[in-house]
Image: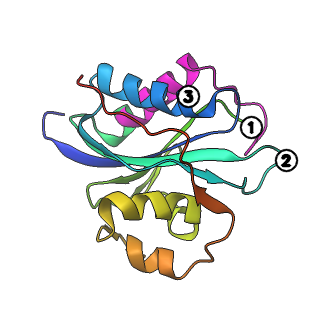
Amino acid sequence: MSSVNTAVLALGSNVGDRANNLQCALDALIESGVLTDVVVSSIYETDPVGGPDQGPYLNAVLRGLTKLDPAELLANTHLIEDQLGRVRTIHWGPRTIDIDILAYNQEVMATEDLTIPHPRAHERTFVLMPWNEIDAEYEIPGRGKVSTCLAALPQGGIELYEDARLIVKAG
C-alpha cells in the first residue's frame, strides 16, 4: 500500500526494565520503517487491568504515519513484540511489551485478528490519558472524542511516570 495513513498505537510493559522496553519498541517501530513522523505521549504507570495478579504497567501512546495496511501493521507489531521477548502464554498476563493498534485513520474494521478502532480503548484510562496528551480531539469512530471518553472514566490507578521519557530518534 503506497498511501500514507495515520496510526495510533499503545505501548505497555510490566516485566523487566519497563521504560527501556517501551523505548526499544518505539525505536524498532521507527528504525524498521513501520512508522514515521512519530509523536509520543508521556509515560504513565498504571495498575493492571484483568488477568492474573501482576505488577504495574508503564504505558504510552504514539501516533505516526505508515504506508502499511492494517494487517501489515499488525504483523510488524507482532514481530517487534516477539523480538523484544513477548511470550503469549497467559491471556492478559505479564509481558515485556504489548503493542496495540488503537486507530488507523478513521477506519472501522473487524477481522479475525484485528478490530479497529481497538474495541476497549474508549473504556481504558491507561489508554485514553496518554492519547489525550497527543490528540485529545481525535474522534474514536462510534465512541466520541478521546477527551470526552476520558472525562467519563474514573481517574484512579494511573499516574505520570516521571523517572523516564520516551525519545523519538530519527529513523
Residue at mark 1: 94
Q: Residues within 10 Å of mark 3 (few under 14, many from 20)?
A: many
Gap between marks 1 and 3 measured at Cα:
13 Å
Q: Count the marks: how many? A: 3
| Amino acid type, callout 1 | Pro
User: Of marks 2 and 1, which one's residue comes earlier in the chain?
Assistant: 2
65 sits left or right of 7 in the view? left
Residue 36 lies, in percent from the top left, at 22, 34
Q: Which contiguous range is marked in magenta?
A: 73-93
What residue is shown with label 3? 21
Q: Residues within 10 Å of mark 1 (few under 14, many from 20)?
A: many
- Residue visible at 72% across and 57% down? 49
Residue for badge 2: 52
Q: CA distance from mark 2 to mark 3?
A: 21 Å
Mark 3 element type: helix
The answer to which of 15 and 165 lies nearer the viewer is 165
Q: Nearer the viewer, mark 2 or mark 3?
A: 3
Q: Position of residue 52 (x, y in %)?
A: 85, 47
Q: Amino acid at mark 2?
A: Pro
Q: How many neighbours does mark 2 have within 10 angstroms: few (below 14), some (14-19), or many (20 or more)?
A: few
- Identify residue type, mark 3: Asn
Percent x, y of residue 101: 44, 47
9 drawn magenta: no
